[in-house]
Structure formats: C-alpha cells, structure tokens
C-alpha cells in the first residue's frame, strides 16, 4: 500500500466521500453528486484526480454517461482508513 496515496485520500473529504459511495458499485458522476451532496463540478474534478492515481477507473469511454468504479488499490486504501477510524472510536 502506498502511504502517499493514503495521505492524499485522507486530506480531502471529497475524495473520501467519493471512494465510500463507489465501494457499493459503479456510479455516474451525477449519481455520486446526488449521494454525497458534493457539487458535480467537484465530483468530476476529484474523479479525474483519483483516476490519475489509479484509485478509481472509468468503465465507459463515452463523453456522457460515464460510470466509475473503485479499483483494488482504492478499496485497499479505503479499508485501511476505515479500520483506523474504527480503532480510534
């Protein structure tokens, strides 16, 4: 696991929220925005950033109707963060 990626994710509530909702399956940016109450522009930008770090991936190459899912690395990082949060509570 990459500590730089863990640090990167925990520094942003948007990144965490997006990874949490993608944990349940692929979603479009609009659906992610609806589920997280994060503006669609922030969701789109954050997805691009997460995709650049291979924490999420786009399943559709079309301009519209893109679906994103969390990668194995993204899932590992999210699980690590969740375990740490549970152990501190």
Image (spheres, helix red, strand yellow):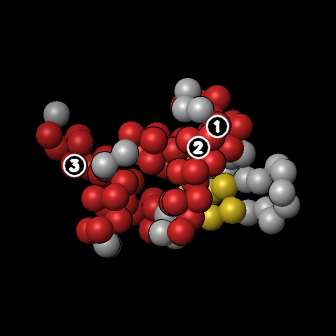
Q: Single out the residue that lies furthest toward the left.
A: 88
The residue nearer to you, when weighing 42 against 35, is: 42
- SS for dot 3: helix
Q: Which residue is mark 1?
A: 40
CA–CA distance in space, label 3 to label 2: 25 Å
- From the viewer's perspective, tell me whether residue 19 is left or right of residue 7: right
**Marks 3, 2: nearer the viewer:** 2
Report how far apart the C-alphas of labels 1 and 2 lie in the structure. Answer: 5 Å
**Is the C terminus in the top left, top right, bottom left or bottom right quadrant?**
top left
Q: Which residue is mark 3?
A: 84
Indicate the position of residue 5 as horizontal and vertical percent values. 35, 65
Check the picture and name the quadrant holding the N terminus.
bottom left
The earlier-in-sequence mark between 3 and 2 is 2
> Callout 1 environment at 10 Å: few (<14), some (14 to 19), or many (20+)?
some
Which tag, 1 or 3, sits closer to the chain's start? 1
Q: Secondary structure at mark 1?
A: helix
Residue 82, label in figure: none
Q: Which residue is at 37% across, 45% downward?
A: 12
Measured as percent of width and height from the top left, residue 24 is found at 58, 45
Quarter of the view holding residue 47? bottom right
Residue at point 39%, 40% (across, down): 13
Residue 24 visible in image = no
Q: Judging from the image, what secondary structure is the residue with disc 2 in?
A: helix
Q: Spatial distance from mark 1 to mark 3, Cα to Cα?
A: 29 Å
The circle drawn on residue 43 is: 2
Q: Is residue 48 above or below residue 29?
A: below
Confirm or deny contact between disc 1 and disc 2 (CB under 8 A): yes
């Amino acid at each position: 696991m990459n500590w730089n990626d863990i640090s990167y994710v925990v520094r942003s509530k948007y990144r965490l929220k997006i990874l949490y909702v993608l944990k349940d399956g692929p979603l479009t940016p609009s659906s992610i925005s609806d589920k997280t109450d994060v503006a669609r522009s922030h969701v789109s930008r954050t997805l691009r950033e997460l995709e650049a770090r291979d924490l999420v991936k786009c399943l559709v190459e079309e301009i519209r109707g893109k679906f994103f899912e969390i990668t194995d690395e993204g899932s590992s990082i999210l699980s690590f963060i969740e375990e740490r949060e549970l152990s501190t509570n």
